[in-house]
Image: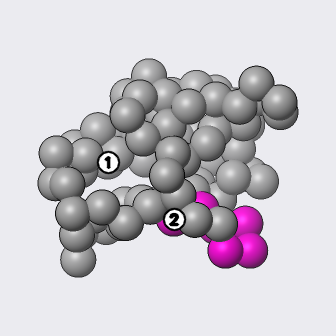
Amino acid sequence: MIVITLQRQKCIGCNYCVELAPAQFQMSKKDGKSVLLRATDNKGFHTLKSPDHSILDPAEAAAGACPVKIIKVKEI
């Protein structure tokens, strides 16, 4: 299981996550911040749990490129 977490309020809208993992992230037209697709929101932490291990490498690349370090990826 792959778990991706995004602290959306702290997003600066750099777009790196979308460029590196477009299947998981997109930019909101409303406020210019990143949106973690198919995620649940729990007090500002948007979390996606997926059994699809093919999303691991792009998600880790997005987390590594994020200048404000608001994306966390773990494999459980």
| Relative height, residue 28 to residue 49 (above, below) | above
The residue positioned 16% from the left and 54% from the top of the image is: 53
Specify the segment rendered in magenta.
Answer: 42-47
Is residue 2 in the magenta section? no
Q: Which residue is mark 1?
A: 60
Q: Quadrant of residue 45?
A: bottom right
Report helix, strand or loop for mark 1. Answer: helix
The residue positioned 71% from the left and 31% from the top of the image is: 28
Report helix, strand or loop for mark 2. Answer: strand
Q: Position of residue 52 (x, y in %)?
A: 20, 54
Q: Residue furthest front?
A: 38
Q: Which residue is mark 2?
A: 47
**Prevailing secondary structure of the magenta residues:** strand
The residue positioned 58% from the left and 65% from the top of the image is: 40
Q: Position of residue 44 (x, y in %)?
A: 73, 66
How far apart marks 1 and 2 lie (CA) works out to 14 Å
Looking at the picture, which amino acid does disc 2 mark? Thr
The C terminus lies in which quarter of the figure? bottom left
**Closer mark to the observer between disc 1 and disc 2:** 2
| Relative height, residue 24 to residue 51 (above, below) | above
On the question of residue 42 being in view, the answer is: yes
Looking at the picture, which amino acid does disc 1 mark? Glu
On the question of residue 5 being in view, the answer is: no
Q: Is residue 49 left or right of residue 28?
A: left
* Colour setup of the view: one colour
The residue positioned 37% from the left and 34% from the top of the image is: 23
Q: Earlier in the sequence, mark 1 or mark 2?
A: 2
